[in-house]
Amino acid sequence: MLSEAEANARLRAFEDETGAFAFIVGGVSAWRVIRFPVALALQGIALSPPRLGRRALLTHAWRSFMDLMFCRGGKAYAVKSYVSALRFRGPDGAEDIYFNKLLREIPGGVYLYSLNAAANTPSPWLGRVNAINTTAIQVLAGILARLLPKSGEAAAIERLAELIRERLGVQDFPAARILRMVSSLHWQARLNGWLLGRLGVKWVLAADTGERALIKACRDRGVRFAELQHGIYTEDHPDALAASTPLGACPVTALLLPDRLALYGEYWAARQRDTLAARTGGTILVGAAIIDWARELRSAWRADPRRPRLVVTAQGFDQGALASFLDEFLTAYSGDCELIVRLHPAYSRGAGGYEELIARDSRIRVQPGAAQPNTYQLIAEADLHLSIASACHFDALAIGTPTGVIRLEGWELVAGLVAEGCALDLTDPGALAAVVDSQVWNPGGLLERDYYCQPGFVDNVSTLLKTR
C-alpha cells in the first residue's frame, strides 16, 4: 500500500512521461476526471459505502426529480453537500454540519444535496431551508452516459487506458469505464447548468474536491465556484495539482479548477500555496462553522481525572487492525476510562466489527457515524482524540483537544504532526496505556488553534460572496 505522497509521486512521473492531461474529451481532461480514483487504486484504498437498495434509490431519485421540477429562482448563492453531512443535531432535526449556520444567517441561499450514504435518512431540517435533492441528476447522467456517450475521442481514451495499465499497473480503468466517467461528467454538467439557470445564483460553494461537473456547469453559466476544504487537503492530495504540473497541450480550463479555494486556516494555505488552484484562483481563509461551535463546547467542558475520556474516530479502512489495537490497549490498561469509538458516517454500519470487544469490556462503546452527539462534540468533550490518519486530527487541534496518531497502516499521511510535536506518537497499545496512566495529554509542540482553523466562518464566507 502506497502512502498518499508516494502515490502522488507515481502519478507525477506518469504525467511527465505520457502527457496524460492532454487527453481532452469535450474540452475536459479525461485524466483529470479519473486521477483521484486511480490514486486510490495505487494506495490500495477501497472505500465502499453501504449500498442502498434499488427501491430506496428510486424513491430518492423520484423525490429529487420533484424537487428539481418545482425549484424556484431568485437565489443569491447555492451550497452543495451530501446526506452524510446531516450530522448536526439542531432544533429541526439533523442539519448540515458544514452549511447550516451559513444558510440560517445569510439570506438568499439554496441547499443542494445528493445521496452518498445509506445510513442517513431525510431530516425535517430539509423542509425548513430551501433544499433541493439533486440525486436524480447523477442517476440520469449515469443512464445517459451509457446510452449517449461522448463520441469522437475513442482513440484517445483507448490510449489513456492502455498507458494506465502499462505504466501504472492499474487494471481497473478500461477505456469503457473512462468513457462512462467522462460522459457522465458532461451530462451532469448540462443538467446542473439547467438547474443553475433556474436558480439564478451568482456563487456556488461545495465542500468537496470532486464536484467537477458542477464546476463545468458554473463555468458554462458564468457562475462563480468556491471549493470549501473538506478533510485533509495537502499538496499530495490527488486533486491538488501542483503549479509545476506538466500540462503539455492541455489548457488550464480543461482541468476544471475552482474560482476560489476556501481553506480552514493558514496551515492549509501554506500546504496549498504551490498548487494550480491557489495560483490561478487564489485562496481565502474561511474556517468552519462547526469548529466555531465546538470551541465553545470545549471552553465549557470539565474533565474528570478519575475517568479519562478517549474518543477514537475510525475511517473506512483498516478497521480490523484498529479494533485489535484497542482490544490490546484495554488489556494493557487496567484503570477506569471511557473509550468511545466513532464510526465513519459513510463507510461503516452497525458496530463496525467491535461486537466482541463491547461484550467483554464495559469501558468501550461504539457510536455509528450518524448518531448523536456528533463527532465534533465528542472531540470537544474528550481528554484525548485518537485516529490513524484522519481529518479529525486537525479538527481536534483546531478545537483545542490533544490528539494522538495510532501507527497503523496509512498513518504516514499525518506523520508530520508527530514530527512537529503536535500529536502524540502511539506506536503500540502499550504506548497509549502509558499516556492514559500518566494523563499527560499534550505532546509539547502545539500551535495556536487559529493556525489550523480561522474563526468566524459566516463572516468570512459573507466577504467571499460579495466578491466577483
Image (tube, helix red, strand yellow):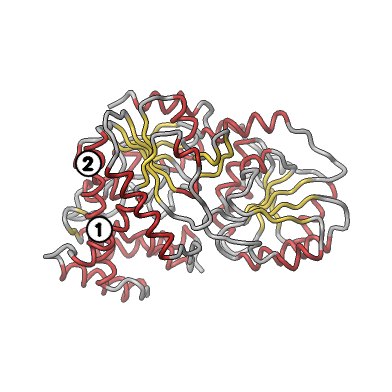
Tell me the SS state at disc 1. Answer: helix
Task: Give the label on residue 324, or none.
Answer: none
Q: Residue at x 27, y 31 (%)?
A: 202
State the image quarter where residue 141 is shown. Answer: bottom left
In depth, the one of 452 and 118 nearer the eye is 118
Observer able to see residue 271: yes
Residue 175 placed where, x, y %?
25, 72
Give residue 21's mark.
1
Q: Name the residue under label 2.
A: 219
Image location of residue 356, percent across then percent down: 74, 68
Q: Position of residue 6 (x, y in %)?
A: 46, 62
Label 2: few (<14), some or many (≥20) within 10 Å?
Answer: some
For label 2, the SS is: helix
Query: Dot 1, crowdedness within 10 Å: few (<14), some or many (≥20)?
Result: many
Indicate the amino acid at tag 2: Arg
Location of residue 279 in the rendering, given as x and y in whole percent from the top left corner: 32, 39
* Amino acid bearing label 1: Phe
